[in-house]
Image (tube, rainbow, N blue to C red):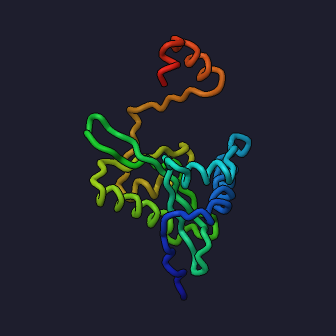
Amino acid sequence: MSHPPVPTIRPARPSDVPVIVEMVHELAAYEKAPEQCHLTEEGLHTALFGPQPALFGHVAVDLDDQPFGFALWFLNFSTWAGGHGIYLEDLYVRPSGRGTGTGRLLLATLADLCVQRGYQRLEWMMIHWNPAAGFYRAIDAAPLDEWVPYRLTGTALRALASHLPTASAANR
């Protein structure tokens, strides 16, 4: 019985953007919300490779250097820990690459970045029905059920922004 080759994990390159966007849309469909995904190649390229990138990415590639999984992440900061951490926005492996250890390697890559750079945490959120919960427990990731995520979008976001005094808005 032959084993699939260990995938290579590397930082995302500009040439990876189209396939990463495809996979983000696949992830949105998997999470039963394809209509909520509006990511474009231009938007992702700017976020990852623009003049002041605030998003970072790694890809899992096959022997032909073709991406089949990705992790998109950004830095956060904990005032209590007094240092940065990584917030994993999305991790996805195409069905053909699942069960090969690719997800673990992507997470291990981010964990290694944390260790090497002195970051305090690697954090993410997961939809409650995701079967990856068992995998996360197996690597000793702890769910934070005492913390409740909140979000402002659309009308509510604009309504709150409208409460900013004109002088404050001018100093942004």
Position of residue 74 in the picture relative to residue 34 (left or right)? left
Q: Quadrant of residue 26?
A: bottom right
Q: Count the numbered circles shown.
A: 0
Q: Which residue is drawn at 54% across and 43% down?
A: 128
- Residue 131 visible? The answer is no
Q: Residue at x 66, y 55 (%)?
A: 21
Residue reaching furthest to the right: 35
Residue 83 placed where, x, y %? 28, 43
Task: Name the quarter where the N terminus is drawn.
Answer: bottom right
Above or below for 93 versus 53: below
Residue ID at (49%, 13%) = 167
**Residue 25 placement (x, y as % from top left):** 68, 52
Q: Is 84 or 42 nearer to us in this picture?
A: 42
| Residue at 25 percent of width and 39 percent of height | 82
The percent position of residue 148, horizontal first and vertical second, equals: 45, 31
Q: Which of 33 and 69 is in front in this view?
A: 69
**Looking at the picture, does residue 162 appear above or below residue 31?**
above
Percent coordinates x, y for residue 20 in the rendering: 62, 59
Q: Is residue 31 above or below residue 8?
A: above
Question: In terms of depth relative to the viewer, which is nearer, 134 or 64?
Answer: 64
Q: Can residue 59 be seen in this view?
A: yes
Residue 161 versus residue 129 in the image, above or below: above
